[in-house]
Image: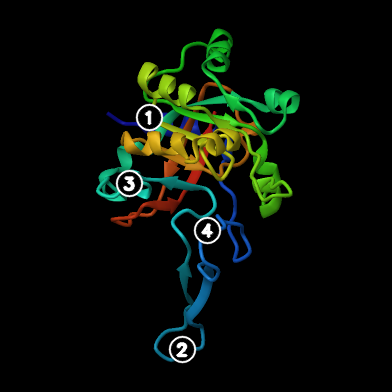
Amino acid sequence: MSLWPELKKLQQGTWVDLTHPLTNDSPYWAGIPEGSVELCKTVFDYDEEMLSCRIHTYKFPGQFGTHVDFPSHFTPGKVGSEAYGVEHMAMPLCVIDLTGKVAAEGPDTAVTVADIEAWEAEHGRIPAGAFVALRTDWYQRWPDNNALNNFDEEGGEHCPGWSMEALRFLYEERDIQMNGHETFDTDASFLAAEADDLACERYVLDHGHLQVEVMANLDKVPATGAIVFVSWPHIEGATGLPARVAAVF
């Protein structure tokens, strides 16, 4: 069976990069020590006698920029990147738009099962194996770290996100493969504060699922019909890795 005709169709589609570009000044979680990022350090240059070429080294946290998290990120003994192969990298994409709710209620809000059911009433049932992304347009705050965290005067974060009931519904009732969002954290900030934990993220990872954080450009893809590709470096034992994520429709 040849897939070349299907590739031609994909090439003629609209491609959207759902990934933030990274530089030495890109923001990352405040708990990561300073000095953890050093991109494009030249260790071999064009003036070398052995061979005229340039080689860089790259130092960054696994959870840097648009990235994929693996179960070992939160729980010792859980699997890491080595457990997931290329068959996990392409999925139907469903985008749930929470921007209206954020505008009406403010950033301390979360997607609910009722929101998902309303989305399905308009767009159809979420298919098994889907990647479900939560659109909040939070990506437009990149690369302003303070704006991304939306700190209050006491240093508390105020960002929209997932609720536990919504994630349980998607994984247990709709059998999705992966979820994603534009914020640093899975959990809506007010729910994380109530739980004193990132309980939603822990649920996703402890059940062997993957998620993509700090996504971009979800406002540029349709609610349904696109295919999403999520790729990451083949590094064994990683708890998280920067990802290149793209959608085509």
Do the numbered discs 3 and 2 sit on residues whose CB atoms are within 8 Å?
Answer: no
Image x and y of residue 225, in percent: 52, 22
First in residue order: circle 3 vs circle 2: 2
Of 141 and 235, which appears nearest the observer? 141
Residue type at mark 2 is Glu
Identify the secondary structure beneath mark 3: loop
Circle nearer the viewer, 2 or 4: 4
Do the numbered discs 2 and 4 sit on residues whose CB atoms are within 8 Å?
Answer: no
Residue type at mark 1 is Gln
First in residue order: circle 3 vs circle 4: 4
Image x and y of residue 247, in percent: 52, 35
Residue at 51% x, 11% y: name it: 124
The residue at which mark 4 appears reads as: 31
Q: How crowded is mark 4: few (under 14 residues within 10 Å), some or many (20 or more)?
A: few
The residue at which mark 3 appears reads as: 75
The residue at which mark 2 appears reads as: 48
Residue 125: tell me if it is visible.
Answer: yes
Image x and y of residue 118, in percent: 58, 11
The residues tagged by marks 4 and 1 sit, at their Cα atoms, a distance apart of 29 Å
Residue at 55% x, 20% y: name it: 112
The residues tagged by marks 3 and 4 sit, at their Cα atoms, a distance apart of 17 Å
Image x and y of residue 131, in percent: 45, 29
